[in-house]
């Protein structure tokens, strides 16, 4: 039987590193997926997720267990991703252009292996991936966060409101707006 | 695409399963009966699927073999907080005493309860005596009703002088327990 998050958190508070490793392995993929959705850079996403887990470990004693562990973890990831985005936006124009080109190549390389598919389907898959990336890029950090939390982990509105520390109505409105924008941007791809 | 009067947010609520069972049933029926709403619902599904698929595939291509070791490095680089230092020092003691203490919790609780009760009783007693004393001290006011007072503590050798000031109607009583001492 799988050990509950509560039990692992309780053990982490007693300095049990093995329990913490189990928590990391349980949430690493989801954590990276959220950071990746926010940042669209694999290295940045991995770094942010690792930083978030390190923060979790150092401040787990302060975690009051009033909310679930993963809402706390995702809040840290979203905040760190937003900070990282701000740092990026402060970079010089030259660096930004150069990095953007590399990011684009990075993203294209990472497009799923579509061997076995019809060539026209492969092109369509690649295009859809690129279009989704571009569409997400156009969203504000708050809208990105809400749509990613819903898509990656399937969090309820209530849980998303806990992560982002806003009302349920705000979550509903942001999600609606973000989806509309994505649909508009993706247009015929859907 | 045909338009309809149904609010588009309702479709999101149905899709995200955020309505209670009764409302969900009604709204889902409305959407199924309305071609425009059905189309919007399909768009929503496709957007969600495309987004999830893109992210899942991207994450599945990442190498996580170095993920935990890098976190461990980050944890080692963190300076320990004073609180965690204390927690680390007391950990062996806590581990040693945690089990025996937890077994005797009812005994500890009873003992502490009795001690608190005893402390409360002992602190209350002087207060109640004090209250009686205050009441006793106030009684001379009653004694003065008939202009008589009795001083019980006087010994046979004490000298008493009572002097009345007629203008202010004040009475002064001198008591001297030292034999041979002259009163004013």
Image: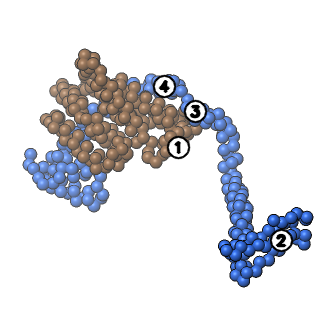
Chain colours: A brown, B blue
Select label 4 or label 3 by which is in front. 3
Give the mark nearer the N terminus: 3 vs 2. Answer: 3
Residue B82 shows which numbered tag? 3
- Residue in view at x 23 percent, y 48 percent: B12
- Residue in view at x 19 percent, y 47 percent: B41
Q: What secondary structure is marked by label 2?
A: strand
Q: Residues within 10 Å of mark 3 (few under 14, many from 20)?
A: few
Residue A142 falls in which quadrant of the image? top left
Give the mark nearer the N terminus: 4 vs 3. Answer: 4
Select label 3 or label 2 by which is in front. 2
Residue B74 shows which numbered tag? 4
Residue B160 shows which numbered tag? 2
Q: Residues within 10 Å of mark 4 (few under 14, many from 20)?
A: some
State which chain disc 4 sits on: B
The answer to whether tags 2 and 1 share a subunit is no
- Residue in view at x 77 percent, y 78 percent: B149
State which chain disc 3 sits on: B
Residue placed under numbered mark 1 in the picture? A7
Residue A73 placement (x, y as % from top left)? 42, 38
């Amino acid at each position: 039987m799988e050990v509950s998050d509560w039990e692992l958190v309780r053990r982490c508070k007693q300095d049990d590193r093995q329990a913490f490793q189990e928590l990391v392995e349980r949430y690493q993929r989801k954590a990276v997926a959220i950071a990746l959705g926010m940042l669209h850079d694999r290295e940045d996403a991995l770094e942010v997720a690792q930083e978030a887990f390190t923060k979790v470990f150092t401040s787990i004693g302060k975690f009051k267990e009033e909310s679930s562990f993963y809402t706390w973890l995702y809040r840290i990831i979203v905040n760190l991703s937003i900070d990282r985005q701000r740092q990026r936006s402060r970079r010089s124009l030259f660096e930004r252009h150069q990095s953007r080109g590399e990011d684009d190549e990075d993203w294209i390389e990472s497009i799923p292996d579509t061997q076995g598919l019809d060539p026209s389907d492969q092109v369509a898959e690649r295009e859809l991936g690129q279009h989704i990336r571009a569409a997400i890029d156009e969203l504000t950090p708050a809208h990105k966060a809400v749509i990613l939390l819903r898509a990656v982990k399937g969090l309820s509105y209530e849980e998303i409101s806990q992560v982002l520390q806003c009302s349920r109505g705000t979550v509903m409105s942001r999600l609606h707006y973000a989806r509309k924008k994505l649909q508009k941007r993706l247009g015929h791809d859907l | 695409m045909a338009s309809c009067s149904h609010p588009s947010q309702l479709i999101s609520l149905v899709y995200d399963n955020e309505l209670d069972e009764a409302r969900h049933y009604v709204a889902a029926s409305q959407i199924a009966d309305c071609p425009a709403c059905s189309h919007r619902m399909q768009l929503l599904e496709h957007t969600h699927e495309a987004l999830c698929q893109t992210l899942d595939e991207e994450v599945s291509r990442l190498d996580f073999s170095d993920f935990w070791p890098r976190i461990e490095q980050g944890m080692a680089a963190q300076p320990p907080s004073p609180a965690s230092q204390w927690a680390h020092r007391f950990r062996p003691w806590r581990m040693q005493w945690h089990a025996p203490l937890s077994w005797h919790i009812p005994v500890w609780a009873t003992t502490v309860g009795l001690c608190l009760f005893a402390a409360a009783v002992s602190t209350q007693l002087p207060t109640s005596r004090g209250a009686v004393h205050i009441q006793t001290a106030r009684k001379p006011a009653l004694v003065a009703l008939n202009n008589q007072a009795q001083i019980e503590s006087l010994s046979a050798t004490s000298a008493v002088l009572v002097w009345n000031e007629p203008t202010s109607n004040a009475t002064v009583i001198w008591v001297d327990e030292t034999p041979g001492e002259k009163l004013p």
